Amino acid sequence: MTDWLVGLMEDLGAPGAGIAIALENLFPPLPSEVILPLAGFTASRGEMDLFDALLWTTLGSVVGALALYWVGALLGRERVLAIAAKIPLVKPADIEKTEAWFLRHGRKTVFFGRMVPLFRSLISIPAGVERMPVTTFLALTTAGSLIWNSIFVMAGYLLGEQWELVETYVGIGSNVVIALVVLAVLVFVGVRLAERRKGRNTSRR
């Protein structure tokens, strides 16, 4: 993967880094924790302007997030509720509770979500479903992405040949986030199965 990113940046320069980050939003397995420090390292070698690296990676983040926003907008609330009704153990009420929470905290979620692995991409979809004003979404996404990107691009720039250290340490944080998500899903499934079992026992009496 690193060789592909290096080739993309060598061929296209800073716009190549922007394209990689846009794709990372759409395909989370492409880690920004690799792309951004690598862009910073490339800039430290004089093969890319540092300002251009920050500009294009942030632009890529916004473009990728906007694409997912429109996916959510095209799905719409009614389709999401219909899909939820077909998923085992998920109730439309769960979506309605999530919707109510997002309406109260959506702005903070979009802004800070840009700095959380995994959620960085996914948060754009509910923003689209709830039709958050595009200008607001773009402003929050740009601000959050600029902070996140600047930290990692500058880390790669300052670390130079040791830029891969960023991936090592951030990877630990990403694994923690994934583990917490898996734990939350397991707890949700456990609670929902217990409710279903309790309901069956009650109906037999």
Image (tube, helix red, strand yellow):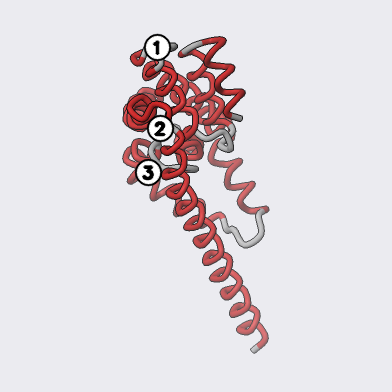
Residue ID at (53%, 19%): 19
Label 2, on which residue?
132
Q: Secondary structure at mark 3?
A: helix
Q: Secondary structure at mark 1?
A: loop
Crowding around mark 3 (Cα neighbors within 10 Å: few <14, some 14 to 19, many 20+) is few
Nearer-N-terminus badge (3/2): 3
Contact, mark 3 vs mark 1 (Cβ under 8 Å): no
Residue 136 in picture, x, y percent from top left: 34, 27
What amino acid is at disc 3?
Leu
Q: Which mark is residue 23?
A: none
Crowding around mark 1 (Cα neighbors within 10 Å: few <14, some 14 to 19, many 20+) is few
Front position in the image: 2 or 106: 2
Residue 108 in picture, x, y percent from top left: 32, 40
Quadrant where the N terminus sits is: top right
Residue 33 in picture, x, y percent from top left: 46, 35
Label 1, on which residue?
46
Q: Is residue 22 left or right of residue 112?
A: right
What amino acid is at disc 1?
Gly
Q: Secondary structure at mark 2?
A: loop
Q: Is residue 66 above or below residue 187?
A: above
